[in-house]
Image (spheres, rainbow, N blue to C red):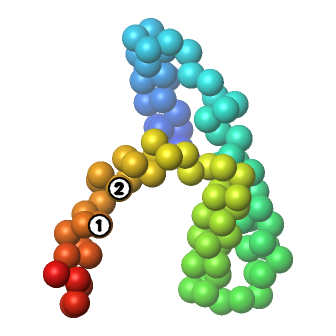
Amino acid sequence: MVTILSELVLLLPFYYAVRKHLGPLPWLSLLWQPVVASAVMAAVMWLLREIPWPLLIPVGGAVYLAVLALIGGFRQPDMDLVGRLLPVASIRARLPGRR
């Protein structure tokens, strides 16, 4: 509980600074897709609650990513950024038969 409260305390000055220097954030358009994907993931995990948790965690992650993809949560600029940040090209170059 203390961690959550400390994060909220940190959020206030950071949000003030972002709003002051960049303008207001469109909270609804930023958060609706992750919230929907989280709700579907939670529902699926609750329905499958009898499955051992080490198996349930990857199922939950897969459901979250699938729902997020289905509702358009991955935009091309975001994927371009991920592609630049992850060393995908160097990993592919190291794979056998990929020279």
- Mark 1 to mark 2: distance in Å? 7 Å
Name the image quarter holding residue 26: top right
Q: At 71% across and 41% down in the image, what residue appears?
A: 32
Q: Is residue 16 among what the camera can see? A: no
Left or right: residue 61 versus residue 43 is left
Residue type at mark 1?
Val
Percent x, y for residue 77? 46, 42
Residue 35, compared with residue 45, is above or below; it is: above
Residue 38, compared with residue 16, is above or below; it is: below
Q: Is residue 11 among what the camera can see? A: yes
Residue 96, compared with residue 78, is above or below; it is: below
Left or right: residue 69 versus residue 8 is right
Percent x, y for residue 10? 43, 30
Q: At 64% across and 78% down in the image, what residue appears?
A: 59
Please tell me which residue lies in front, 45 or 97: 97
For residue 5, the mark is: none
According to the picture, the residue beneath numbered tag 1 turns out to be: 88
Badge 2: residue crowd in 10 Å (few <14, some 14–19, many ≥20): few
Left or right: residue 53 versus residue 46 is left
Residue type at mark 2?
Gly
Element at label 2: helix
Left or right: residue 23 versus residue 84 is right
Please tell me which residue lies in front, 18 or 29: 29
Percent x, y for residue 28? 69, 31
Q: Earlier in the sequence, mark 1 or mark 2?
A: 2
Please tell me which residue lies in front, 82 or 39: 82
Element at label 1: helix
**Label 1 close to label 2 by CB (< 8 Å):** yes
Q: At 48% across and 22% down in the image, what residue appears?
A: 15
Name the image quarter holding residue 57: bottom right
According to the picture, the residue beneath numbered tag 2 turns out to be: 83
Name the image quarter holding residue 44: bottom right
